[in-house]
Amino acid sequence: MGDFKFFLTGCLFLCGLFNYSYAISPVFEDNDSISFFELDDIDAHRDFVATKQFIDSIDIYSNPACELYNYSWTSERLNPYRIKIDSLPDSVFIDCTDFVYPLQSNRITSNFGMRRYRYHYGIDLGVKVGDTIRATFGGKVRIVDYERKGYGHYVVIRHNNGLETVYAHLSEVLVDINQTVTAGDIIALGGNTGHSTGPHLHYEIRFLGNAFNPTKLIDFGTKHLRKKEYYITRKDTYSHSQELKALAQARYHKVKPGDNLSKIARRYGVTVKQLCRLNKISTNTILRVGRKIRYR
């Protein structure tokens, strides 16, 4: 068994050397057990983050879509993979046949996309506090955490089909990290925790860390899938990538006493018309002190 461990460890290490997304490096402890550390930042090739679960050489295969995610499994961060959209594999088949709609409500309170100064990476669905929340597909719970100024109580599940789903602003979580769930299992109760202005479920679908519009996959009006066999493509699934690139290049001016659109436009070498278009305002809009005005 010891020889098999060393053989398997060596294979995984060699595979990691040739993978551009992230790598796995074996570290031998004093007790001859093996733990794995994953490369968290593929751009800088540094900042190794230990996996949360101490595993032996065979347990790693129990994680959903382990090959697709290059055997990476951590509960420390929502997106530890850091794979840019342009680097995603194209035309990836996703089996959605075990789909279960995650909650009773289909009332959309906020869509996927731009929100003034930031991007909303999910879709918000109206709920009552205590409403049942279910797993969309079968898989394994990767994260159970709380963010006071963000998601509140939230759960992340990696699914057997390669997708990951996020369920946020929950009042109570009913599953544990590393728990295996099947599609339709009750995982939490709806709530209003974290940065939230009212009870709702913030719901995300991600692939290799990159969120895409859930309406690409789910018809929220009927609560059914649009397609039981879905192909992820950069052109269609991630059609919003240009918006994200533009957002990354955006620059803002914080309004000070005495500022007006003309003054701001002159300062940054743009026109008032451009400022109005970028900020979706009119020339008569009152600029309150402290407001951010996008100029690029």
Image (cartoon, rainbow, N blue to C red):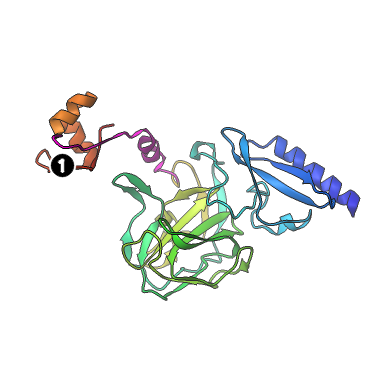
Q: Which residue is mark 1?
A: 287
Residue 267, x across and y down, in percent? 21, 25
The structure residue drawn at horizontal position 13% and vertical position 30%, both measured from the top left corner, is 262
118 on left or right of 8: left
Residue 190 drawn above or below residue 197: below
Say few, some or many: other residues with alpha carbon within 10 Å of mark 1 (under 14 / 14 to 19 / 20 or more): some
Residue 175: in sight, yes or no?
yes
Residue 104 drawn above or below residue 265: below
Front one among 142 and 237: 142
> What amino acid is found at the position of numbered circle 1 in the picture?
Leu
Residue 222, x across and y down, in percent? 38, 68
Query: Could you say which quadrant of the image residue 183 lies in?
Result: bottom right
Residue extent of the magenta highlight? 238-259
Q: Which residue appears farthest toward the front when viewing the image?
A: 257
| Secondary element at tag 1 | loop
Q: Which residue appears farthest toward the left when viewing the image?
A: 284
Q: Quadrant of the N terminus?
A: bottom right
Residue 206, x across and y down, in percent? 50, 52
